[in-house]
Amino acid sequence: MIREEIAFICCSDIAGQVRGKGFPSTDILDRRIRGVGWCPTNMQITAFDAIAETPFGALGDLLLVPDNKTEVVVDFGDGSPRENFILGDITYTDGQPWECCLRTMLANALESMNSETGLTLLSAFEHEFQFVDDEVETETAYSLGGFRAGQAFGETLLSALRAAGAEPDSFLREYGKDQYEVTVAPQPGVKAADQALIVRELARATALRSGRRVSFTPVRTPSGVGNGVHIHMSFSDADGRPATHDPNGPGGLAATPGAFVAGVLKYLPSIVAFTAPSVVSYTRLTPHRWSAPFNNLGYRDREASMRICPVAEIPGYDVASQFNVEFRAGDAAASPYLQLAAIVKAGLQGIRDGLAPPPPTEEDLSLLNAETLAARGFERLPRSLDEALARLEQDETVRSWFDELFIDVYLKHKRGEMNYLKDLSEEEVFAAYERAY
Ligand code: GLU
Ligand code: MG
């Protein structure tokens, strides 16, 4: 069959979907500069395709302009079309940034943090996902047999990731039914979020080529195991030296990273609407699911929303260069750009306010009563998307970090998503998210 290659320029949106437009790949030189036309209301296409209330209507024109450093070309070697896509930023037609472009929002947040502190953020996204086609039962958690059942998929995925410029760190059979996890090495700045998008898309692309289907939905059933997105964060100074660790700091954190962590925790109840933005995300964010029900910093505690990660304290391994903090209150219903932008803005507020991180917990906070929790400065995170959106809407500080137009667009989008689901049964809601992610 004859075939002309099509390349695709795309962006990640509020729905956590990757959308864009294709063009003959021979036009790449021109498209690299002027991108493709884009429409403001595209931002209001929900995960279920129904369009939420839009302040833009049918009006307005934008451009989706590629960042050529993000070009992904992967040949799977099986005769299927190459994955050929570039990630881009949304601008007005004169090239000025659009207030609602999530990738630009992240770049600006990182730039502010860097100019105010001299520190660069490095992040690594750890993704959990499940095979949802039920074609192969993948044996038991963490087992070699379970790994083997996903090995061909994993090896193809790792090869695709490497071809796309990511550095695979690990691939394993996770605990949940047919659940796997893939992690790539930390990257500075926006590149980390670019690679999170690339991981999700190449996992889907790999599954498709073997006739299988994976889902990154936050959780598949009310009692199921969650698919988390854990974001590992560390800082380097202007000379590229690790700057996260101070053996004498609280929890081993140096002063500025400690204030960053304190800011993220303080504002987490208001930003979780960005980091865990689906209706089913709040089933995952409940106690005893190894996710993140409270706004606590944990040490050796996998139910903390921020966790000080273990490091190898053995000869030949430097603690400072391994030291990192993991954000656990996120899932793949979120755009990785918005997720990280919200975290960075909250962290920067903590740095500006000179906050100190709370003492790390090593206990089950769900056993404490409301008074004890409040006295110790812990808050149960919102229990529903509705509650999370209300928290965001009411938090003047958090709103001030974003353009007013964007907050309006975001709230309308998410409320439109909830409205679409309102007449569905619980089972149908979970199924709809499983299909969408
Ligand atoms: N599946 C858990 C989550 O929803 C995380 C398990 C772990 O890797 O600690 O975040
Ligand atoms: Mg895991």
Image (cartoon, rainbow, N blue to C red):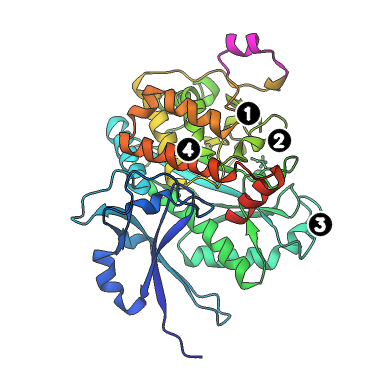
Q: Is residue 57 above or below residue 324?
A: below
Question: Looking at the image, is mark 4 or mark 3 nearer the viewer?
Answer: 4
- Sequence-wise, which precedes: disc 1 or disc 3? 3
306 sits left or right of 38 in the view: right
SS at mark 3?
loop
- For label 4, the residue is 274
**Whole-percent x and y of residue 86?**
38, 64
Q: Which residue shows up at 55% across the image and 23% down it?
A: 251
Three-letter amino acid code at disc 2?
A: Arg
Three-letter amino acid code at disc 3?
A: Glu
> What numbered label is drawn on residue 293?
1
Which residue is nearer to you in this view: 55 or 170?
55
- For label 2, the residue is 289
- Sequence-wise, which precedes: disc 1 or disc 4? 4
Question: Looking at the image, is mark 1 or mark 3 nearer the viewer?
Answer: 1
Three-letter amino acid code at disc 1?
A: Pro
Q: CA distance from mark 1 to mark 4?
A: 16 Å
Three-letter amino acid code at disc 4?
A: Phe
Image quarter for ligand 1 equals: top right
- For label 3, the residue is 139
Q: Is mark 1 within 8 Å of ligand 1?
A: no
Magenta span covers which residues? 367-378
Q: Which residue shows up at 70% across the image and 21% down it?
A: 366
**Whole-percent x and y of residue 175?**
74, 47
CB under 8 Å between discs 1 and 2: yes
